[in-house]
Amino acid sequence: MKVLIIGTGYVGTTTALLFCEMGHDVTGLDLDESKLSMLKSGKLPFYEPGIEDLLKKHLNNGTITFTNNVQTAVKENDVIYICVGTPESKDGSADLSYVKSVAESIGRYINRYKLIVTKSTVPVGTAKQVTQWILASQIKSIPFEVASNPEFLREGSALQDALHPDRVILGTSSHKATLLLKELYKNLTCPLIETSPSAAEMIKYAANSFLALKISYINELGRLCDKLGIDINEVSKGMGLDHRIGNSFLEAGIGYGGSCFPKDVNALIQIANTYQSDLSILNTATQVNQTQPLYFFEKIKENTGDLNHKKVAVLGLSFKPHTDDVRETRSLFIIDYLKKAGAQVHTHDPIVNISLESTVQNATIEETVRDAEAVIICTDWPQYKEADWNDLKDMMKQAVIFDGRNMLDRDKMRSMGYKYYGVGR
């Protein structure tokens, strides 16, 4: 099958390479010339483990090509995937301007029956809206269908999630469209869930919001455990072994960030508001997440005293390990609080390289913690777990660690002579 992927970010590129692996011929379409140039040369414009090797493989095989020619790409492919961004608007709703632009282009250039599939995370009812945009842009009436096939890719493990999904949601309005999508995914062994397009759109928002809810719940319990002298890690383990709950997303920390959870939760709340339906649980989860970095910073202040002119080392800038994404990352909130308190902030991240005003980003962990009066872990990169903390202690001015991800062995760190503070520990 000939598949067109419109939008070559991490979702679009990963989806394109999945279809290549399943034997389809794929075209990646993007208007960003610099991004296309990188992809054509086998380089990724973002960091995602494993994707670059697969990209080079399929470039060499000729099963994937990249172009900026919208007209030719639309005409030559049978199935068209919309994988463009849906950023958050000022009111919290999803901005569909990129989706609309793509739909209008499809309408102008469609030359025979096409199945158009939204992979982007979009509000309920978008499939119907895309249909209307395409119809309004058609020069002459040509049949097509619009389906919803939401993505469930985790940044940092997108390739494995694509190749070995828990499920694939097929939101269609006809038997023909369902058969086409089943043919597209025929080599996967996971359940293929058939729904309406609107249900598929809701499933995506509902799933991400539920995971965000679990994170905020365990973080709020962590605050209580701090007051009760209980280790939240023990609580999480005891809860997570219950198969009805599960241990995923039950790690207390400084909150969730990234390109999905904050945006998707706000979008679902906005959808509910539009229909006068109150999602009070999600509103509270959002409030907990927004205040969690400040809660942790207050703990830092309480145990370090005046931070003015003190060197503080912040380890981890990305919102999670194995990605270079810093959107809504909790570390930037922590850094902002530190700077306002007058601290001299030095940062380190294995992948992210950004310039932050009045901060220093060091090349090594050793340089970052040297002469520091406190170390704050904001991202649970394995490099920090594997670091020689015994040696690092001798480089620090004060052996104090604030573990914002509860990733280190508390008792081991204290046995080395560290003052160790976690979340709910």
Image (tube, helix red, strand yellow):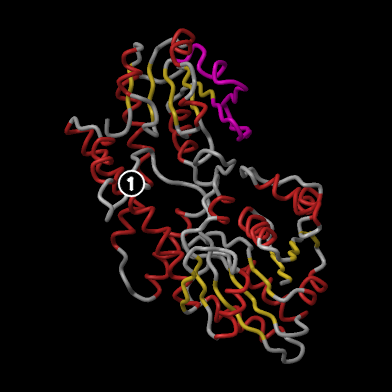
Residue at the image point whose x is 71% and y is 72% from the top: 1
Residue 244 x, y percent position in the rendering: 27, 56
Is 245 located above or below residue 344 in the figure? below
Residue 250 x, y percent position in the rendering: 33, 45
| Residue found farthest to the left | 228
Number of marks drawn: 1
Residue 62 x, y percent position in the rendering: 81, 58
**Label 1 belongs to which residue?**
247
| Residue found farthest to the bottom | 141
Q: Is residue 320 magenta?
A: no
Residue at the image point whose x is 46% and y is 65% from the top: 204
Residue at the image point whose x is 49% and y is 20% from the top: 387
In which quadrant of the rendered image does the C terminus lie? Answer: top left
**In front: 405, or 296?**
405
**In front: 208, or 63?**
63
Residue 71 x, y percent position in the rendering: 81, 74
Q: Is label 1 in a helix, a strand or a loop?
A: loop
Is 220 located above or below residue 201 in the figure? above
Is 64 located above or below residue 271 in the figure? above
Tell me: 106 left or right of 200: right
Q: Which residues are magenta?
A: 347-372
**Majority secondary structure in the magenta region:** loop
**In front: 361, or 185?**
185
Is 317 located above or below residue 103 in the figure? above
Quarter assignment of residue 292: top left
Tell me: 104 left or right of 244: right
What is the three-letter code of the residue carrying label 1?
A: Asn
Q: Residues within 10 Å of mark 1 (few under 14, many from 20)?
A: some
